[in-house]
Amino acid sequence: EVQLVESGGGLVQAGGSLRLSCAASGFTFDDYAIGWYRQAPGKEREGVSCFSNSDGSTYYGDSVKGRFTISSDNAKNTVYLQMNSLTPEDTAVYYCAADTSCGGFLLGFYYGMDYWGKGTLVTVSS
């Protein structure tokens, strides 16, 4: 059974940090790119970051560049998203998703990835 399980969300004050984890199972982790996406109430889904396991490339959405860092631990089949300097605008449900590449992320297609997690809520208070 394919599973992507996000964890690490919570409530944090503006300026604080959180680290999200995405634990994958049931598929060949090394063959997939893992992306982070977020959706706030009443807003469109947004691409946050993507890690390509095939070559280690990393990509970021403009709103998080310089503040968020994505990394992968292939031994644990887990991708992390370190989020620093959080602002209330970062409040959203954060999802991880697996796809064959980061192509969808780069093209702004934030739906239709092969596998999705159920999400973890991040709330940033002002």
Image (cartoon, rainbow, N blue to C red):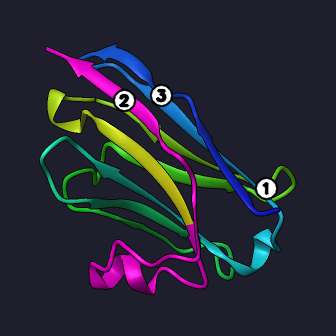
Relative height, residue 63 to residue 33 (above, below)? above
Q: Which mark is residue 122?
A: 2
Where disc 3 sits, the SS reads loop
- Residue at 54 percent across and 63 percent down: it is 97
Left or right placement of residue 94 versus residue 30 in this view: left
Q: Does label 3 or label 1 sit earlier along the sequence? A: 3
Q: Quadrant of the N terminus?
A: bottom right
Quadrant of the image occupied by residue 52 = bottom right
- Front residue of this view, candidates 29 and 16: 29
Badge 3 amino acid: Gly
Check if residue 61 falls in the magenta segment: no
The answer to whether the residues at label 2 and label 3 have Cβ atoms under 8 Å apart is yes
Give the tally of numbered discs.
3
* Residue 91's disc number: none
Answer few, some or many: residues within 10 Å of disc 3's Cα (few below 14, many 20 plus, some between 14 and 19).
some
Local secondary structure at mark 1: loop
For label 2, the crowd category at 10 Å Cα-Cα, with few meaning under 14, some 14 to 19 and many 20 or more, is many
Q: Residue at x 61, y 84 (%)?
A: 100
Gap in angstroms between the C-alphas marked 3 and 1: 19 Å
Does 11 appear above or below 80? above
Q: Amino acid at mark 2?
A: Val
Q: Which residues are magenta?
A: 98-126
The residue singled out by tag 3 in the image is: 9
- Upstream in sequence: badge 2 or badge 3: 3
Quadrant into which the C terminus falls: top left
Could you tell me how far apart the alpha carbons at marks 2 and 3 are, in whole angstroms? Answer: 5 Å
Q: Residue at the front extreme? A: 1
Q: Is residue 13 left or right of residue 101?
A: left
Residue 91 lies, in percent from the top left, at 25, 33
Q: Which residue is mark 1?
A: 77
Q: For residue 7, what is the image quadrant?
A: top right
Residue 115 position, x and y percent, is 60, 68
